[in-house]
Amino acid sequence: IFSSSVTYKYKSRIYSFASIIVFLFIVLSLITPLFIIYNTGGIWIKNRMHAEMPDVHFIYKYLLLAEIDSFKEPIVCSTFTTYKENDIKDHCTIIKVRENDLNNDGQKDSLRFEAHFYTDKPVKSLQLLLFFNFQLKHLIQATIESIGVFNQILNHEVQEIRFFGDLELRQKGLLRSEGLYETYNHSIELSDYSLSELLLHSFNRKFSARITNERVTWRTGFSNDEAVVIIGELFYVENFIYYQPSMWEELKWAWIQYLSCLLVFAYVAKHILVFLFTNKYLNTYIIRPWMNT
């Protein structure tokens, strides 16, 4: 019906062999979990991954360069008016831009860009720069202007080019400090850089845009009576941000690792000591509970 444990106390001098053994088991129980965790990856989390869908907006800045002849200037379509203090003449007759909310969640999910221009010779190569704003809200608070670049070399005559792809942020290096990237929250202007300098400046940033999973189709044949059509559709995708956890975030995981190992070693050490004391392998004297009454 009822039972209660009988607790025996084993006493000895502080400098006795029994006290040294008990102290040794306590130290081993505390240190051994640290040794095991250190040799199985470490107690601290060196980096973590955070998934975030940034708020992406096309800022209606673009630069389209269509090469038709190596000895002639390319066809240019752009919202920029000057390039290194030289005026830019826009050759496009029609530009269509539309951002779509595909899942009706109030956030833009894709961009459709369409350009029409006339040329007397077929296009040999194409370069399109599209400027976007990426707004990160969860891990860091930052608005990053970056460039999505599409390049295509054409080996045959085409009248229409279509390309599709995912637009994502490329992270260069581990994110180590919140608020470190406010320096990137400024506008990129073509008048400040040459084209190669602009692309290099964008590439060397901590965060830069890139087009992935790219697919290109075209309609062959060429007629100078018809407009050359460039159609691109980019889909905004979820990004993975790699960062170094803060001290509190590391402690939240570290104590679970340590405590789970400590409980096992404390349980084993206790039963070993019970065995040593009950079988009188250690010299102590026993205090029984009924002797105090």
Image (cartoon, rainbow, N blue to C red):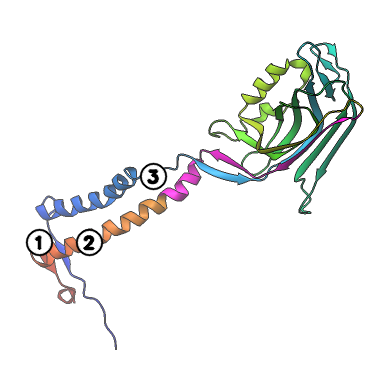
Residue 270 — which label? 2
Mark 2 and mark 1: Cα distance apart in space: 17 Å
Residue furthest toward the front?
221
At mark 1, the secondary structure is loop
Amino acid found under the numbered disc labelled 2:
Lys
Q: Is residue 149 left or right of residue 3?
A: right
Mark 2 and mark 3: Cα distance apart in space: 25 Å
Residue 43 — which label? 3
Q: Quadrant of the N terminus?
A: bottom left
CB contact under 8 Å: marks 2 and 1:
no
Q: Earlier in the sequence, mark 2 or mark 1?
A: 2
Is 246 one of the magenta-colored residues? yes
Amino acid found under the numbered disc labelled 3:
Ile
Q: Is residue 106 left or right of residue 53?
A: right
Vertical placement of residue 270 versus 164, above or below = below
Q: Is residue 126 left or right of residue 210?
A: right
Residue furthest toward the bottom?
1
Q: Earlier in the sequence, mark 2 or mark 3?
A: 3
Q: Exactly how many numbered labels are in the figure?
A: 3
Q: Residue at position x 65%, y 20% from top? A: 200
What is the magenta range?
226-254
Q: Residue at position x 30%, y 50% from top? A: 33
The image quarter containing residue 220 is: top right
Can you give x and y, in whole percent of width and height, for residue 3 in the image?
26, 82
At mark 2, the secondary structure is helix
The image quarter containing residue 278 is: bottom left
Can you give x and y, in whole percent of width and height, for residue 264 in the image?
29, 59
At mark 3, the secondary structure is loop
Label 1 crowd (10 A; few <14 / some 14-19 / many >=20): some
